[in-house]
Image (cartoon, rainbow, N blue to C red):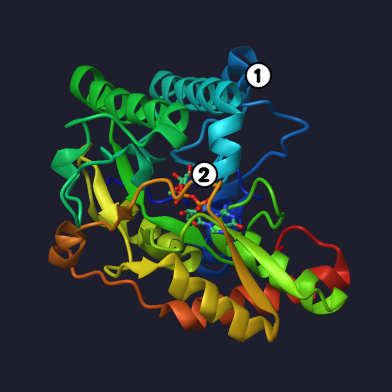
Amino acid sequence: MHISTKTPKCFLAGHTGLVGSALYEQIKQQGQYELITCPHKQLDLTCQNEVESFFDTHRPDIVILAAAKVGGIQANRTKTADFIYQNLMIQSNVMHQAHRFGVKKMVFYASACTYPVKAAQPVTEDQMFAGPAEPTNAAYAEAKRAGVIMAQSYAHQHQMNVITIVPANLYGPGDNFNEQDSHVIPALIWKFHKAKQEQAPSVKVWGSGKAIRDFLYVDDLAELTLQLLEKYDSPEPINAGSGEGTPIGNLIETIQQITGYQGRIDFDTSMPDGAPKKVLDCTKLTQLGWKAQTPLHTGLMQTYEWFLRRLKTHENIRK
Ligand code: GFB
């Protein structure tokens, strides 16, 4: 990336979300970019006119698109229209205006769920379009796949410098914690914590516990993103995972132990497992000299501590 002598202006879209708040902290600490953020209430990224006028006013040099409609397996399989509509609109509006206003570099995040459900594991980047996505998150996956093609198309036609990072299942401070809509880690932390408080005899978890996921701590993704902004210039997607597959059953045991809940676990097998296995092949990243630094247990402890602090302060974000 060519950087002028003045501090580049970086528009961080979605700065209060899981990924956005981790990036916000790291960029603030490092001070390499002048941060531009905007609360959701003042800028609706699904609205083309608002996004255009925002770019016109602020003229960022760099854009990190950390805003997206996200959620766990249940949110994905029920709110299908929200997932496809909001993600298509946000990424189209932001990428198109980034191109129109001459942004020097943009980061787009795809998702591990863009890979075909039957892809060989661990999954390499070249398998992305080799078959249908898992049905529980097809709407989200197809929107993200469109974003991948869009990034490649703007790079091809307009020589736009846009990179696509494909994160594994993310977790960490700043996540959305609730029983129905969240991803598995915040959902389990919430369920076990509540059951412990209420001395409930059992906790219901979803599926068989046999599904395998690759969990990446969000601070590792933020650190990687800032590195790739400096040293990766290709529209070809690049996987970002921990390199390890964790069975959900093991994750359940670990979170139960961290939260200190003593009761019984009931598996609700009327709820789906989703993809049987989602583990990312991170050879490309290894070749760039990067490896995720946070072991799952450490990341879970830090997430739980953050959750407990947030319960006390009722803050939903880290800053
Ligand atoms: O994280 P999660 O909701 O989404 O669920 P996916 C992961 C696994 O945990 C599934 C099981 O096998 C769930 O059945 N699970 C067990 C639970 N108990 C619970 C619970 O209480 N809550 C939740 N949520 N799960 C996501 C996509 O799929 O993958 C996202 O939905 C994103 O869009 C992400 O792409 C990477 O891993 O199945």
Q: Is residue 221 above or below residue 71?
A: below
Residue drawn at 17 percent across, 64 percent down: 288
Residue 118 as seen in the image, left or right of residue 177: left
Q: Secondary structure at mark 2?
A: loop
| Quadrant assignment for the C terminus | bottom right
Instruction: Tell me which residue sits at (39%, 51%) in the image.
Output: 5
Residue 13 visible: no
Which of 234 and 147 lies nearest the eye of the viewer?
A: 147
In the rendered structure, the answer to whether residue 76 lies left or right of residue 137 reads: right
Amino acid type for the residue under numbered disc 1: Glu
Instruction: Give the mark nearest the N terminus, 1 or 2.
Output: 1
Identify the secondary structure beneath mark 1: helix
Residue position marked by numbered label 2 in the rendering:
66
Q: Nearer the viewer, residue 234 or 85?
A: 85
Q: Nearer the viewer, residue 183 or 162?
A: 183
Return the x and y of residue 247 as percentages of the image width and height: 38, 68
User: Tag 1: Cα neighbours inside 10 Å, few (<14), some, or many (≥20)?
Assistant: some
Q: Position of residue 85 (x, y in %)?
A: 55, 20
Picture quarter containing residue 142?
top left
Which circle, 1 or 2, is nearer the viewer? 2
- Total of numbered circles in the picture? 2
Q: Estimate the x, y position of residue 107 in percent, counting from the top left.
A: 39, 42
Is the residue marked by circle 2 packed among few (<14), some (14-19), or many (20+) residues within 10 Å? many
Distance of label 1 from label 2 (alpha carbons): 17 Å
Q: Quadrant of residue 248?
A: bottom left
Q: Which mark is residue 50?
A: 1
Q: What's under tag 2, amino acid-wise? A: Ala
In the rendered view, would you say 151 is above or below 179? above
* Residue positioned 60% across, 85% down in the render: 257
Q: Which mark is residue 316?
A: none
At horizontal 37% and vertical 69% (from top left) the residue drawn is 246
